[in-house]
Amino acid sequence: MPLAYPPFKSCPCGTGRSYSHCCGPAHDGSRPPATPEALMRARYCAYALGNAPFILATWHPQHRPAQLTLDSGTRYKSLSVHRAQGREVEFTATLKVAGGETLRVHERSRFTQLSGRWVYVDDVTPPTVESSGT
Ligand SMILES: [Zn+2]
């Protein structure tokens, strides 16, 4: 089950807006993300909140895994979106894994629209992972 997240708290994706004015409406289905960047943020946020159903639902059917298990020991620390252009979004997500190691995952993601909704397709280039600390 996804974690409940207080609607007034600032959104885990780092826009500075409250969850109810940021990724919340994407997660509850009341307002599908209007741009690839908004979807990318909502997906990051879903990882942070353990919302696997949202991640799968916004993954292109031909590319998504049959199932997705999120590691509950991973903490999603921050997201930086470097560039959002056309159907691509380049970002770095910083996470802390269960062992205490901090990983910076840099990826260029590709999105497309299916029936008027944005979905994640895949990474344009394999993500690079840089680790620090233990
Ligand atoms: Zn957000």
Image (cartoon, grey):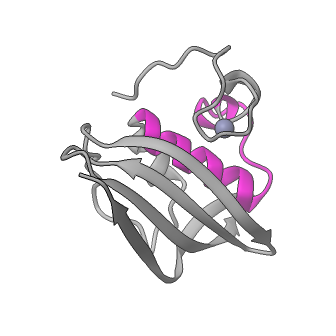
Viewer-side residue, 34 vs 97: 97
Q: Residue furthest left?
A: 99
Does the rendering let one see residue 115?
no
Q: Nearer the viewer, residue 73 or 85?
A: 73
Task: Please report the bounds of the magenta region as a residue range.
Answer: 24-49
| Residue 3 within the magenta-colored segment of the rendering | no
View quadrant of ligand 1: top right
Image coordinates for residue 112, horizontal then vertical, percent: 68, 71
Q: Which of the 4 quarters of the picture holds residue 129?
A: bottom left
**What residue is drawn where x is 80% and y is 51%?**
34
Viewed as shown, does residue 129 lie left or right of 28?
left
Image position, residue 126 (x, y; %): 44, 82
User: Where's the N terminus, which quadrant?
Assistant: top left
Vertical arrangement, residue 15 with respect to residue 107, above or below? above
Which residue is drawn at the image coordinates 64% and 34% (left, top)? 29
Percent position of residue 4, x then y: 46, 18
